[in-house]
Image (spheres, rainbow, N blue to C red):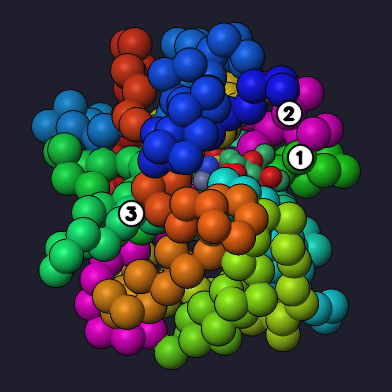
Amino acid sequence: AVSHWCYESQKYEDPLCQGPREWYQIYATCKGEKQSPINIVTKNVVLDKSLNSLNFEGYDVKESSAWDIENNGHTVKVTLDTSAKIGGGGLGRKYKAAEFHFHWGVQVGQQYLPGSEHSIDGEKQAMELHIVHIREDASDIEAAKKYANGVAVLAFFIKIEEENRNYTSLISELENIKYKGQTAQMEPLPLSSLIPPEEDLGRYYRYEGSLTTPDCYEGVIWTIFEKPIALSLSQITQFSTVYFDGKNSTPMAENFRPVQFLNGREVYRSSA
Ligand code: SG7
Ligand code: ZN
C-alpha cells in the first residue's frame, strides 16, 4: 500500500505510516525553513506597534446554511461558508474563514497530557483551535496556496477550566463522526461564541510559518492569541471519543505536530 502520513500516536496501530519526522519523504516542503508550529520564547519576541487589533467581520453572525462537521482522519473539522472575515492587525489584506479544527492531547490516568501545537516558553496547553482563513480573492484553500501569504490561521489555546456551554452542541456531534470520513450536519454557531470575547482577546503573537500538516505549505500568517478558551476536562476528553480510522482503530489523540526550528525567523507581538 502507498504510505500515508500520520501522527506519532498512530504508529502503534500502523507502524508503517509516515510520522511527523518522515513527512518530508512524501512532502518535501515539510523540511522547509519556515515550518509550524513553533515554541514562542517570550524574551525574544519583538514588539511591533503596527500590530493593532484585528477586525472581525461576520464573526457574530450565524451562517445561514448548516455546518458540516467531519472526522477527516486527522482532526475534527467544520467547513465554513467564508462569510466571516478578518482584516487589520497587520495582515495587509482581508482573509475569509474557510474552516476550523482542533488539535488535542490525551488523558493518562488523572492527568491530561497537553496537545496544543504551539507552546509559549515551552508550555503547551490542553488543546488548540485553528480557524483557517484564505485570501479574499481565492476560491478555496488549494487556490490560496498558489500565493505567498495565501492563508492566515488564527490560533487559540484551550485550557482546562469550567464547562463552556457554547461548545455543547459541537461536542455532542462527535458521537456522529466517530470514524474517518464521517460527516454530520449541525446548526451553525456564530464563530465569536467559540472564542474569547473580542474585548478580552488582548495580546497576540505573529510569525510567518506553514500548515502544520502535509503538504506543509509555507505561506501561512500565524496569529496566536495569549488569552485561552476555557473548556472543562470532560469536554476536552470527549474529543478522543472519535477514532483516527474505523472501528477498533486508535482513539484520536495527540494529533499535533512537534515544534519546528525558527531558522532565524522573528516572532512579533502586538502592543495591546
Ligand atoms: C487539518 O489541518 C485540516 C486541514 C488543514 C490542516 O488536518 O483541517 O484542512 C483541510 C481542508 O483538510 O489543512 C489546508 C488546511 O487548512 C492544516 O491546518 S493547520 O495548519 O491550521 N493545522
Ligand atoms: Zn491545525
Q: Give the range drawn in magenta.
A: 142-164
The quadrant the N terminus occupies is top right
Query: Does residue 148 show up magenta in the picture?
Result: yes
* Residue position for label 3: 105
Q: Which residue lies furthest to the bottom in this view?
A: 165
Which residue is disc 2 drawn over? Answer: 145
Mark 1 crowdedness (10 Å alpha carbons): few <14, some 14-19, many ≥20: some
Q: Depth check: 233 or 270 in front?
A: 233
Residue 175, position as x, y percentages in the image: 59, 77
Residue 69 location (% of width, % of height): 69, 67
Q: Badge 1 is on which residue?
A: 141
Label 3, secondary structure: give it: loop
Residue lying at 18% horizontally and 32% vertically, measured from the top left:
41
The image quarter in which residue 68 lies: bottom right
In magenta segment, residue 150: yes
Q: Measuring 63% from the left and 14% from the top, which residue is drawn there?
A: 26
Q: Can residue 96 be seen in this view?
A: yes
Q: Which of marks 3 and 1 is nearer the N terminus?
A: 3
Circle 3/circle 1 CB separation < 8 Å = no
Does the Cβ of the disc 1 residue fall within 8 Å of ligand 1? yes
Position above or below: 190 against 129:
below
Labels 2 and 1 touching (C-beta < 8 A): yes
Is the residue marked 2 within 8 Å of ligand 1, measured from its CB? yes
Instruction: Point out residue 240 in the picture as x, y percentages from the top left corner.
Output: 43, 64
The amino acid at mark 1 is Ile
Residue extending farthest to the front is 248
Relative to 246, is 27 above or below?
above
